[in-house]
Image: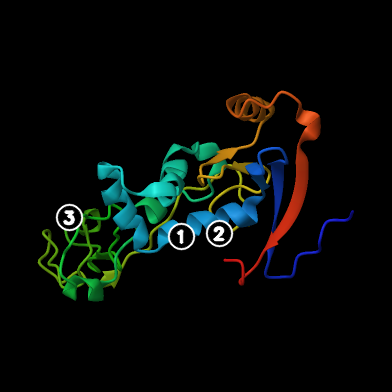
Amino acid sequence: MAAPTPSPTAVSLKLLIDPITHRVLFAEATKDFVDFLFNIMSLPVGTVIRLLNKQGTAGCIGNIYDSIENLSESYMLTANKDTLLKPIVPNNAAKVPPLLPTVESSNLKPTGIYRCGNTYHRGSCGLYVANDSKSVCPSCNNVMTQTATIVNPRKGSSTNEGGYVKGVVTYMIMDDLVVTPMSAISCFTLLNKFNIKDVGVLEEKTINIGTDEV
């Protein structure tokens, strides 16, 4: 039987099912679904989960957090995991009574970098930068209003992929939302965990996850 054709806004999941116990052992997912799952952590809920994890009350959503934290950098497209693990809470949230401990996001960046426009005064004005355009240059006492250009190092290989994880890998998603790169070893380990003796009885089913299912 042919797999259902997903709509443009849906992603496919391949489920491995034990028909005897009627249990989904795991889902085989591509980059699209893993990106969707990880994107949940970019919401302010990511900060809440990080705090609740200390008390062991985060549940399955906390497993997504742990999966991102434990996933090797070789599978991640996002250079800084803090964009997911420690999302910046909007300023208007500061008016809400603080029911959780205060936490600082380590990926909070200034809106701009400024330098002194005087390049001739003792040749040292160019040594200073500031994140406030009203700062005073320590060398010549001029206001540092000139915007500096930030140049990132050139990477050995570039990719046009968006999202959070690389698309060349297939991922395994457990029923408790733990996400790991899929491999033969991880499959065998999981089958042993569920005491599956005959893999021939297992069933494979492809489903589409769209807006309605989410």
Q: Is residue 86 left or right of residue 163?
A: left
Of the pair 144 and 72, the residue shown nearer to us: 72
How far is the residue under mark 1 from the one under mark 3?
21 Å
Q: Residue furthest front?
A: 20
Is the Cβ of the residue at disc 1 closer than 8 Å to that at disc 3?
Answer: no
Q: Quadrant of residue 181?
A: top right
Does the image show residue 44? yes
Please state which amino acid type lies under the numbered disc 1: Ile
Q: Please, what secondary structure does the residue beneath circle 3 have?
A: loop
Q: On the image, numbered disc 1 is attached to which residue?
A: 40
Marker count (numbered): 3
Q: Earlier in the sequence, mark 1 or mark 3?
A: 1
Q: Where is 83 relative to 155, above or below?
A: below
Please state which amino acid type lies under the numbered disc 2: Phe
Q: Please, what secondary structure does the residue beneath circle 1 have?
A: helix
How far is the residue under mark 3 from the one under mark 2?
28 Å
Q: Where is 157 relative to 43, above or below?
A: above
Please state which amino acid type lies under the numbered disc 3: Pro
Does the image show residue 81? no
Picture disc at residue 101: 3
Q: On the image, numbered disc 2 is attached to which residue?
A: 36
How far is the residue under mark 2 from the one under mark 1?
7 Å
Is the Cβ of the residue at disc 2 closer than 8 Å to that at disc 1?
Answer: yes
Q: Residue furthest right?
A: 1
Residue shown at the point (57%, 49%) measured from the top left:
165
Viewport quadrant of the C terminus: bottom right
Q: Is residue 88 left or right of residue 11?
A: left
Query: Where does the image place residue 44, in percent across and percent down from the top left?
Result: 34, 63
Q: Please, what secondary structure does the residue beneath circle 2 have?
A: helix
Query: Where does the image place residue 167, in percent across and percent down from the top left?
Result: 66, 49
Q: Quadrant of residue 26?
A: top right
